[in-house]
Image (spheres, grey):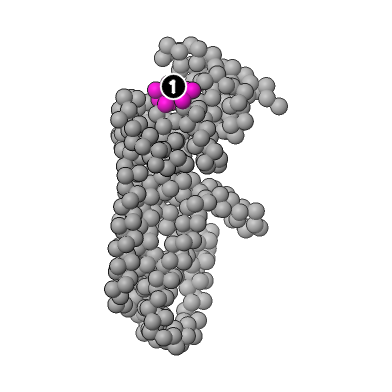
Amino acid sequence: LAVLQTREYGAWIGLMAALIVWILSPWATRRLRALAPTQRARLTPFVAGALSLGFLLLLGFPTLLDLPQHLPIPWENLHTRLEYARNTLYLIADFPLGGGFASLSGLYSRYILGIAHVFITSSHNLYLDLAQEQGVLALGAFLYLWSAAAVGALLEAENPFARAALAGLVVLAVHGLFEAPLYASPALPLLFLPLALAPPRTVSRGSAYGLLAVFLLSMLLLPLQLPVTRQAQIELQGWPRTRPEQTAPEALQPLIPAYERTRRLLPHDFAAQYRLGLIALQERDFSAAVTHLQDAQHRKPAHPGVRKALAYALVWDGQVRQALPLLRALPEAEQDLRNYAHWWPTQGRTDLAARAQAALEALFAAP
């Protein structure tokens, strides 16, 4: 009754889904037991693989999350939650092996919003939080464990503990789409309680080899992520007490050769172009920053961090007119430009202060 009196849609939907599964589990058990042993053995990898492929599809096309906004769903926070999810997918693509525990706050503020204060500490999605912090490999392992536990519980649904574990797994899976209260809290062990209650299943040798192959394949991503991770470590050292955008440019100089190698190996790599643009901005090489950031925006046009960085790079490069469409989309642009108009003279750059003032006037004059 307490849950029904709240507006926790994730909890509502999770409990309803668990009730439906509880009712249908005897029928599903009979169907599963009717399968041949080889078919049952393939069921867990199939379910985990299907879920993983769905996630990889979203990772490759984050803007797919914009589609539900056009549906008549009575949830006032839908737009905000989908925006958090889409932006977190951008981070996961940059850090496929994970950004580290409790890293979302700094990475989101620095590389998604371009701000110097904490905005969010969770994406409000269990799977996105797990993939962002620990990597897509960890998410795949979690999905495999969940699939194995669900199949094992279904095969023994007449067992009260197995049936309760199955209901718990469903609540966990569904509620995780809307919130992640256990993941980033001292109650984290409770997240795995339904997995522990599920009947154990024997892991086949083929499944073990498959997991090993996935792990070894993921190691190929390590050289690509190392410079991105190192830049985040340098810029976010002392976060949130420090301002990442004021990191000394010479501290980031050693990373440029690694990014250039990545560009030669993968000409369409987004993360390398975006970081090179940010480094050029901090070096005040605005022409180079515009070049890198325009290329990055071409790869991911909806990325808010790239759009904001490119807007100001264009202004500092003297291309105020070209920056206007991007500035109009920034709610904070007016206040930022006013601040820059006062800040640049303290850095001995009255020319850039004049460009900030010109951009501010053009912003007001724009139809």
Is the magenta region chiefly helix, strand or loop?
Answer: helix
Residue 107 x %, y %: 39, 41
- The answer to whether 208 appears left or right of 36 in the picture is left
Residue 199 x %, y %: 32, 78
**Residue drawn at 58 percent across, 27 percent down:** 323
Residue 290 lies, with reference to residue 197, above or below; the image says above
User: Can you identify the residue that label 1 sits on?
Assistant: 285
**Residue drawn at 54 percent across, 29 percent down:** 311
- Residue 6 seen in render: no
| In front of the other: 229 or 347 | 229
| In front of the other: 327 or 120 | 327
Q: Is residue 350 magenta?
A: no
**Residue drawn at 53 percent across, 59 percent down:** 7
| In front of the other: 261 or 126 | 261
Residue 327 x %, y %: 58, 29
How crowded pointer 1 is (Cα within 10 Å; few <14, some 14-19, many 20+) is rated as: some
| Quadrant the C terminus occupies | top right
Residue 60 x %, y %: 49, 52
- Where disc 1 sits, the SS reads loop
Q: Is residue 281 magenta?
A: yes
Give, as a three-letter code, the residue at label 1: Asp
**Residue at the farthest right position:** 367
Span of residues in magenta: 280-288
